[in-house]
Amino acid sequence: MAQIKLENINKIYDNGFHAVHDFNLEIKDNEFIIMVGPSGCGKSTTLRMIAGIESISGGTLTIDGKVCNGLKPHDRGISMVFQSYALYPTMTVYDNLAFGLRLAGFDEDEIEVRVKEVSEILGIQSYLARKPKALSGGQQQRVALGRALIRHAKVFLMDEPLSNLDAIQRVNMRSEIRRIHNTVGATTIYVTHDQIEAMTMADRIVVMKDGYIQQIGTPKELYFKPVNMFVAGFIGDPQMNFIYGKVEGEKFIAKDGSVIELKGFNSKILENASKKEEVVIGFRPECCAVEKIKDAKQFESAMNVEVSEMLGDTLNIYGYLGKNHMVVRTNPFTKYTVGEDLKFYVNYDHVVFFDAKTEYIINED
Ligand code: ATP
């Protein structure tokens, strides 16, 4: 187990490109951290700097109190799992697992004990004699994880380890990796562009954009208390609804004149929002509802149904509140017809407001 501290870490590549800016993070013993963000945001660069396969341009990396900036990768007590499984095709699973330990001079009895241990954790005992090409993608990824586990490293780094798997294998491996983490208990830093992986697996998530940390928090904090519109939009599927407009009293008035009632909503936030020239109201698709009633159009808030997605357990209804495109996630038995107007409600327990200029959240203070 290990504590990792990144203080003001920066990366400037040789061509002058500044890929990571002032990255600050303290990772606790045994914590499962996921770095997430769109392509090019600097998450892999940060991971590679922790691994030691990319130099650190500025700042300090400490593992268990020891500054690691200048240490070689194998002196950092780290194991890394990549997107490509990088298994040796001519070797059996057993030999793939044993390879690193043989290089490090372990005797065969100890190697056998460790292969047995990790193959039991991963459930790969029955194919130790097979070559990688006789395994499914998910099984190959398990072996790749096994190669990292067998070294008993105190830190695991994983770079998009599930991206070569199909959708079902990915879902299975998500819980599998979490189970392994709970069993083995090593500090883990995991990189992905997939917000669902981040939400389902992480203790804490680091959201990055253009080389900057946007927010660090638990999945729940990021979902319900995003600091800005980027985080709010990146986390959650379907995306949070955003409508531009103004707050007047206890009403939100969209640019096109559509109205959302906010009677009883946090008065301090309303007051702060009403001082801004323009705000954005944000609400999750499951924090609103629609109702089929006669002459729904006569109400200030009516949603015109454009299209729907029936997922079995839920129903996503896409449509327009005035000119504003929106999605409502509701129960699959909701009555509606494409093209009709439905009465629209927002459950404002989880409504948030952003300053349209800065795109940052408007709080009570
Ligand atoms: P992806 O999900 O696509 O891997 P990422 O968030 O992991 O994206 P990085 O690979 O860390 O992003 O790259 C961050 C930025 O640094 C990108 O704009 C990339 O083009 C740039 N970059 C990466 N490697 C180098 C390099 N060797 N020299 C110059 N720029 C680089």
Image: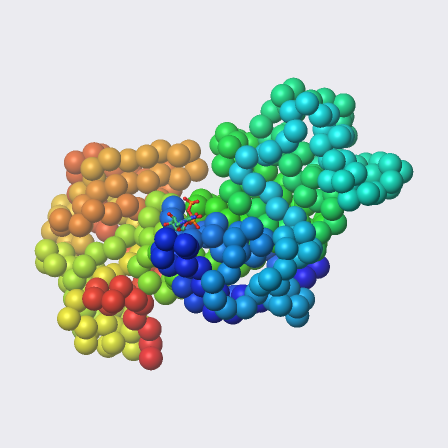
Looking at the image, which residue is at 58% across and 54% down?
A: 52
**Residue 349 in the image: x percent, y percent?**
36, 63
Asked which colour scheme the image uses, the reply is rainbow
Looking at the image, which residue is at 64% across and 31% down?
A: 87
Looking at the image, which residue is at 25% across and 76% down?
A: 272
Q: Horizontally, is 102 left or right of 357 in the view?
A: right
Q: Nearer the viewer, residue 88 or 240?
A: 88
Q: Horizontally, is 244 left or right of 55 in the view?
A: left
Q: Is residue 255 visible?
A: yes
Q: Is residue 224 visible?
A: no
Quadrant location of the N terminus?
bottom right
**Tally of numbered discs:** 0
| Residue 130 drawn above or below residue 14 | above
Q: Nearer the viewer, residue 223 or 357?
A: 357
Looking at the image, which residue is at 60% across and 62% down?
A: 70
Residue reaching furthest right? 109
| Residue 5 drawn above or below residue 188 | below
Q: Nearer the viewer, residue 288 or 109?
A: 109
Q: Nearer the viewer, residue 203 or 188?
A: 188
Q: Quadrant of residue 14?
A: bottom left
| Residue 305 drawn above or below residue 267 | above
**Residue 251 in the image: x percent, y percent?**
19, 66
**Residue 9 in the image: x percent, y percent?**
48, 65
Q: Horizontally, is 57 left or right of 240 in the view?
A: right
Q: Quadrant of residue 253?
A: bottom left
Residue reaching furthest top? 134
**Residue 275 in the image: x percent, y percent?**
19, 76
Quadrant location of the C terminus?
bottom left
Residue reaching furthest front? 14
